[in-house]
């Protein structure tokens, strides 16, 4: 652990205060600025029932930030000519069976990296603990209906990254967990980053908490097949070593090149605009989501597992990267408070404001939105009630077994025509619900990063 700096001391006190305010049991924070870790701290409890404190070397689940690590290895293989961004995946996996021929024959790495494949992303099926778990998972995708045509829109897709992980296994002959060690952990000098529980338990490890007040989750992590999409565990400092690789245009601290400058730039170049530009960013690159804060370019990724949430943002114009890892409570409010203060202090940047209900009346045609919107893991019914709209949200399919509550009801508050917000009980943040149509006129709802078609 590095020598404590004045900024670390200040942020230990401030993070303690903010974590208590937002009911976050434990949190770790690190800040990389101009090539140096200028702040590193951890507060609270990694495990409330056992009374284990969070420390700077505690491993948290970084969740879907793992996707950018998987994407980085994929782009390294593109650099080597082993893979092509626009070559059909079926050329690597000739046995690949998907819902229809158009998807099976046309799917490319670019579709997977930009969440535009149309594969329903929330197939959380446990295919065992064996090294063949990704192969077994991919074999199940043929029985899953797509939630939009290939390339027609963006819909966040965990399944697509498990499929990408399998592609990497086939072209390298190395199982995904070992491939991450070989291609990233060891070259980056990471000693506290791992995926498998038996590796993580060599260290102090955080467990998730759900609800308000937060209570410890009954299970620690997701099934192994979710690895390429979200099973890496790490510390804030080591996540920032990964971010440093991208700030340094693909070169590690010891001068080893992992990615070409061109691939680093391509990952940060907009590939698709988001139907919902209000939460993560306004566009997606190759792995990263992209945004602009106060005129300055930002890229990053979030992660969410069972009661753990992770946040990574990089401001290349200020040579600044921030990582916050948490294990329960109103983590999105904590993220906004912490990152907002740091970027203002170190970059002179004001973080983009969150979306809120309109201050005045908005012309809304309820009949245009009322109906049922459905995909594998979600059934959303929009109903008219007392002159307004209400969203009845039900989690379905395999994902329902992982959720503490499967049914919720929210009042839709208008922002502008076609855009509404909801707020979950006990949380400060407003979350958008966007109604839109594809080019072929099919009506869709975009919520939680997912595109859901209207079915009735």
Image (cartoon, rainbow, N blue to C red):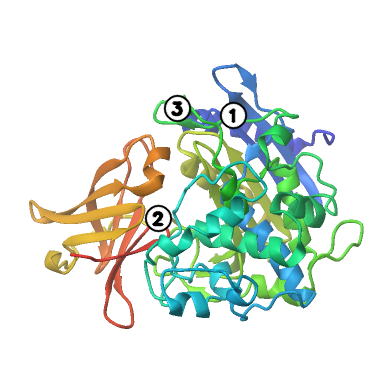
Q: What residue sits right under mark 1 in the picture?
A: 16
Of the image marks 2 and 3, the number of the one nearer the N terminus: 3
265 relative to 365 in the view: left or right: right
- Quarter placement of the C terminus: bottom left
Of the image marks 1 and 3, the number of the one nearer the N terminus: 1
Q: Position of residue 411 (x, y in %)?
A: 21, 49
- Quarter placement of the N terminus: top right
Which residue is found at the position 67% from the left and 32% from the top? 42
Q: Position of residue 189 (x, y in %)?
A: 85, 48
Residue 214's disc is 3
In this view, the mark in front (1 or 3):
3
Q: What residue sits right under mark 2 in the picture?
A: 448
In this view, the mark in front (2 or 1):
2
Q: Give whichever of 427, 110 is nearer the camera.
A: 110
Q: Looking at the image, can residue 311 be seen?
A: no
Q: In which quarter of the image is residue 402?
A: top left
């Amino acid at each position: 652990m590095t020598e404590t700096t004045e900024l670390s001391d200040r942020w230990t006190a401030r993070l303690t205060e903010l974590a208590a305010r937002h009911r976050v049991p434990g949190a770790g924070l690190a800040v990389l600025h101009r090539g140096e870790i200028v702040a590193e701290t951890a507060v609270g409890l990694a495990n409330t029932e056992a009374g284990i404190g969070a420390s700077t070397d505690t491993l948290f689940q970084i969740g879907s930030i793992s996707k950018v690590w998987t994407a980085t290895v994929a782009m390294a293989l593109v650099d080597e000519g082993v893979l092509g961004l626009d070559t059909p995946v079926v050329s690597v996996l000739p046995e690949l069976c998907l819902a229809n021929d158009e998807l099976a024959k046309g799917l490319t790495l670019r579709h997977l990296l930009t969440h535009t494949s149309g594969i329903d992303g929330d197939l959380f099926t446990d295919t065992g603990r064996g090294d063949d778990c990704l192969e077994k998972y991919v074999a199940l995708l043929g029985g899953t209906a797509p939630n939009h045509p290939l390339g027609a829109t963006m819909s966040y897709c965990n399944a697509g990254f498990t499929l990408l992980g399998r592609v990497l296994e086939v072209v390298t002959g190395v199982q995904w967990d070992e491939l991450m060690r070989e291609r990233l952990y060891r070259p980056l000098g990471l000693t506290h980053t791992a995926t498998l529980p038996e590796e993580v338990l060599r260290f102090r490890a955080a467990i998730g908490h759900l609800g308000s007040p937060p209570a410890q989750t009954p299970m620690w992590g997701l099934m192994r097949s979710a690895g390429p999409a979200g099973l890496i565990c790490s510390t804030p400092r080591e996540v920032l070593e990964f971010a440093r690789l991208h700030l340094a245009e693909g070169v590690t601290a010891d001068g080893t090149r992992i990615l070409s400058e061109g691939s680093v730039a391509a990952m940060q170049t907009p590939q698709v605009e988001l139907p919902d530009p209000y939460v993560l960013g306004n566009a997606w690159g190759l792995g990263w989501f992209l945004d602009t804060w106060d005129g300055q370019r930002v890229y990053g990724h979030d992660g969410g597992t069972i009661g753990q949430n992770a946040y990574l943002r990089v401001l290349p114009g200020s040579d600044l990267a921030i990582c916050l890892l948490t294990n329960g409570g109103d983590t999105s409010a904590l993220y906004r408070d912490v990152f907002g203060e740091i970027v203002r202090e170190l970059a002179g940047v004001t973080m983009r404001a969150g979306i809120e209900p309109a201050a005045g009346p908005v012309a809304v045609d309820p009949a245009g939105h009322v109906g049922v919107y459905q995909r594998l893991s979600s059934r959303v019914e929009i109903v008219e009630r007392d002159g307004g709209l209400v969203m009845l949200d039900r989690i379905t399919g395999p994902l329902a077994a992982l959720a503490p509550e499967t049914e919720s009801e929210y009042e839709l508050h208008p922002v502008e025509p076609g855009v509404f917000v909801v707020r979950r009980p006990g949380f400060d943040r407003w979350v958008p619900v966007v109604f839109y149509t594809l080019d072929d006129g099919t009506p869709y709802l975009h919520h939680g990063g997912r595109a859901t078609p209207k079915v009735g």
